[in-house]
Image (cartoon, grey):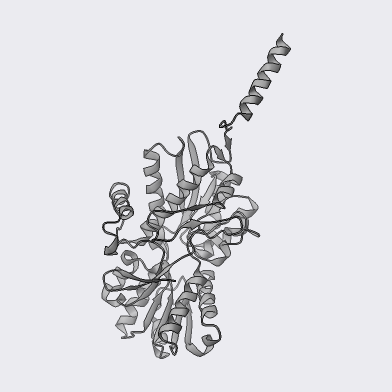
Amino acid sequence: MRKQFLGSAFAAAALLALAPGVQAKNYGPGVTDTEIKIGNTMPYSGPASAYGTIGKAHAAYFKYINDQGGINGRKINYITYDDGYSPPRTVEQTRKLVEQDEVLLLMAQLGTPSNTAIHKYVNSKKVPHLFLSTGASKWNDPKHFPWTMGWQPNYPNETKNYARHILKTNPNAKVAVLYQNDDYGKDYLHGLKEGLGDQYGKMVVAEISYEVTDPTIDSQMVSLKASGADTFVNITTPKFAAQAIKKAAEIGWKPAHYLNSVSNSVGAVLNPAGLDNAKGIYSAFYLKDPVDPQWKDDKDFKEWIAWMDKYLPDGDKLSSFNVIGYAHAYNMVELLKACGDNLTRENVMKQAANMDFEIPMLLPGIRVKTSPDDFAPVEDEYIGQFNGKSWELLEKM
């Protein structure tokens, strides 16, 4: 009788496992019935500290989700460390997140040099390394780095679009370029060279770099003006972008000015530089700018403002970085919902490679879309120009 009972019990269990709609829970590191651990590094201090608010926005959005009961009953435990925009510290803190905190995944770590330093490590550990806060083209390489995925439009495509705009509006332009001397700056520069093609050597009259440890870029700006350039491609992070805009005004240099999208925040960059000094600057956009009056009655924008008021009350409502953080976190929540109760690292990557949906605060017509062969979630952009108060969108690039 006992053998018959056990046999019946095993048969019943097998049938239950095969029953439609019944899915066994399958967890990877950092997941329990009540928790999902997500890891992040962010420059809360150092030369790129203006970006730190992105991490604060992540945390605020996850608190909002947790207050609603979390994701399928699991609260998000967001663990974020300061790396000071220093690659060695990024390595140290990332190892801590993976080996000590045992997070399920890494999300939206900031900086090209920082993520480059951990690129091989996280792939060797098979840890999802998702939605990176950097537009380097290397993040879209699922064949060689199947655990890494970018998020925002890539840098070379952006500067290719600037090149097209320059050739269209001023084919005889004399171009001066300022760029950060690391992978981030060189990636942007590579796109400009491709975009201008065989005209690069003829049109670019000055190409000057700076180090992220430099206190200012004043001397570089004086040299760029002295080159006689009438067009300026500004490939800088927020601190140096604000300095460049301000210094150009101080020395009376008024070129057609193209500012990379990572530094086009009105609150974090243009305000400190002086809004009048920034008038006329071009940049690229894929998110709704919080200072653009055309969104004041937009449903997504109203919801973002209400969220800021409740969950990030000290945050700057003029800063696009708080929009980026909100969008990252929204995307992550949708991804984790898609995983259901199969919260393994392998399934996270499977779902990440099959996204196709809209995210609040992305510009109209721009979707998050990936495939197993395409790890670039956001690819489209608009070009816009600053009118002294807000950015005006000109055309889709």
Numbered marks: total: 0
Q: Residue at x 38, y 79 (%)?
A: 257
* Camera-side residue of 194 and 189: 194
> In the displayed structure, does residue 11 sit left or right of residue 174?
right
Across and down, in percent, residue 67 comes to: 36, 39
Above/below status of 138 relative to 315: below
Q: Quadrant of the image for the N terminus?
A: top right
Quarter of the figure with the C terminus: bottom left
Q: Is 368 left or right of 375, judged from the image as shown? A: left
**Residue occupying the point 44% across, 88% down:** 174
Direction top: furthest residue: 1
In the rendered image, residue 388, in percent from the top left (x then y), is placed at 27, 73
**Residue 211 visible within the image:** no
Image point (65%, 60%), residue name: 144
The residue nearer to you, when weighing 219 against 119, is: 119
Q: Nearer the viewer, residue 276 or 381?
A: 381
Give the residue furthest to the right.
3
Give the vertical position of 317 relative to 285 (above or below). above
Q: Nearer the viewer, residue 364 or 198?
A: 364
| Residue 316, horizontal then vertical, whole percent | 30, 58
Residue 110 in picture, x, y percent from top left: 48, 60
Name the side, left or right, on which 363 lies relative to 185.
left
Q: Is residue 366 visible?
A: yes
